[in-house]
């Protein structure tokens, strides 16, 4: 494979195989791998008109011993099914989800970035409503697909803090679909994100949609802060996307770093309590937050230039587990023989 492993970004690179399965007449037909990276779907498909679609994102990592790690894929399967239920789509059985993910990883394993490059194979499971339709109701058929693409290290040359700006827009409604991984939330976030980037910020911070007083999300990642007295805090709200990385960090902060770790309210006018802050997610891994711009002021946490010590420790612990260099908590890693 003549890919420049050390300089991969986060863009689509075609890999040979993807998994497809169709749900029809009340059940899943047997899925299979295909080489075609285009979908042919009916023009009336609900995914196109009414946003009846949800997705997942997870990574496969090449270990030092040549085998391959999947990080908590069962959690992605469960979350996909929670999103599916919210949008009135059929569940994808966990065995089918895991079989699809493993088949795609194995079939495309030449595209997994080598150990030590910081890259990984990003997997994108997708569930969409398809078939002949025009009215506003659930689709007659569904398509489940998993494709993958190699991606580079999020930070080349070490963790670097970036700044964020609080948005006037909401990404989700209080009892809407904020906790579901659905395309509609992302469509709603494109304009605010673009405006933030136009002002030289990495992305925007969304506040809670009912009171606009608490931090909810950092772009498409979850927020965490480390308080002066050594507590790990991450926001709790029904309209936040429940990040698997976030729940993993809550556990690692407590079990491996000895911090008190809680989900709670993070008021935007009480940022002084934090000595460090970061964003977390499968794509963002852990991204240190330098500062947050809110009401004409940039609030800087640890530093705009350097990552704080606890954020760095959390990063090393998490990434060490993902690549198989550190002992994982029970059932976090599924090894695929490479
Ligand atoms: C996927 C996603 C995250 C991160 O979740 P992980 O499970 O950690 O990858 C955070 N926020 C939003 C809006 C997301 O869609």
Image (spheres, grey):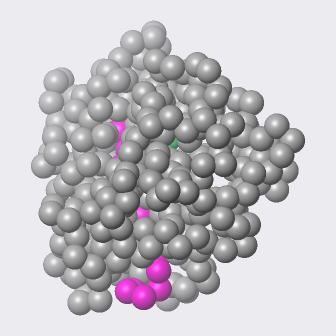
- Residue 296 position by quadrant: top right
**Residue extending farthest top:** 135
Between 62 and 240, the residue placed more toward the observer is 240
Residue 56, x across and y down, in percent: 38, 47
239 sits to left or right of 99? right
Q: Magenta part of the protein: which range?
A: 114-128
Can residue 312 be spotted in the picture? yes
Give percent across and percent down for residue 192. Answer: 72, 38
What residue sits 16% from the left and 40% below the top?
93
Residue at x-position 23% and y-position 90%: 65
- Is residue 101 shown in magenta? no
Residue at the spot x=20%, y=65% of the render? Answer: 329
Task: Please state the total of marks drawn on the protein image.
Answer: 0
Is 125 covered by the magenta stretch? Answer: yes
Give the vertical position of 115 relative to 243 (above or below): below
Using the image, determine if residue 108 lies above or below residue 80.
below
196 vs 228, nearest the viewer: 228
Foreground: 185 or 109? Answer: 185
Residue 157 in the image: x percent, y percent? 61, 83
Q: Quadrant of the N terminus?
A: bottom left
């Amino acid at each position: 494979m003549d890919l420049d492993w050390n300089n991969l970004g986060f863009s689509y690179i075609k890999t040979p195989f993807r998994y497809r399965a169709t749900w029809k007449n009340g059940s899943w037909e047997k899925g299979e791998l295909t080489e075609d990276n285009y979908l042919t779907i009916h023009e009336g498909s609900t995914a196109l008109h009414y946003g009846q679609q949800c997705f997942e994102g997870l990574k496969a990592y090449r270990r030092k011993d040549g085998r391959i790690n999947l990080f908590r894929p069962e959690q992605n399967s469960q979350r996909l099914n929670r999103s599916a239920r919210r949008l009135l789509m059929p569940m994808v059985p966990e065995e089918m989800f895991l079989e699809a993910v493993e088949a795609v990883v194995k079939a495309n394993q030449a595209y997994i970035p080598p150990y030590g490059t910081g890259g990984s194979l990003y997997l994108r499971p997708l569930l969409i409503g398809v078939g002949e339709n025009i009215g506003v109701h659930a689709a007659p058929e569904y398509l489940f697909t998993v494709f993958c693409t190699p991606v580079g290290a999020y930070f080349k040359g070490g963790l670097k803090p970036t700044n964020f700006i609080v948005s006037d827009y909401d990404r989700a409604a209080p009892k809407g679909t904020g906790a579901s991984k659905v395309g509609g939330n992302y469509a709603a976030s494109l304009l605010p994100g673009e405006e933030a980037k136009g002002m030289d910020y990495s992305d925007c911070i969304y506040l809670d949609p009912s009171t606009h007083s608490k931090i909810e999300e950092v772009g498409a990642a979850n927020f965490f802060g480390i308080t002066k007295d050594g507590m790990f805090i991450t926001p709790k709200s029904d309209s936040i996307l429940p990040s698997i990385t976030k729940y993993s960090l809550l556990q690692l902060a407590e079990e491996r770093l000895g911090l008190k770790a809680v989900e709670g309210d993070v008021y935007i006018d009480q940022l002084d309590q934090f000595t460090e802050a970061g964003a977390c997610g499968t794509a963002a891994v852990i991204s240190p937050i330098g500062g947050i711009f809110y009401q004409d002021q940039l609030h800087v946490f640890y530093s705009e230039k350097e990552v704080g010590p606890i954020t760095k420790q959390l990063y090393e612990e998490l990434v060490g587990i993902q690549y198989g260099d550190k002992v994982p908590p029970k059932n976090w890693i599924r090894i695929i023989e490479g």
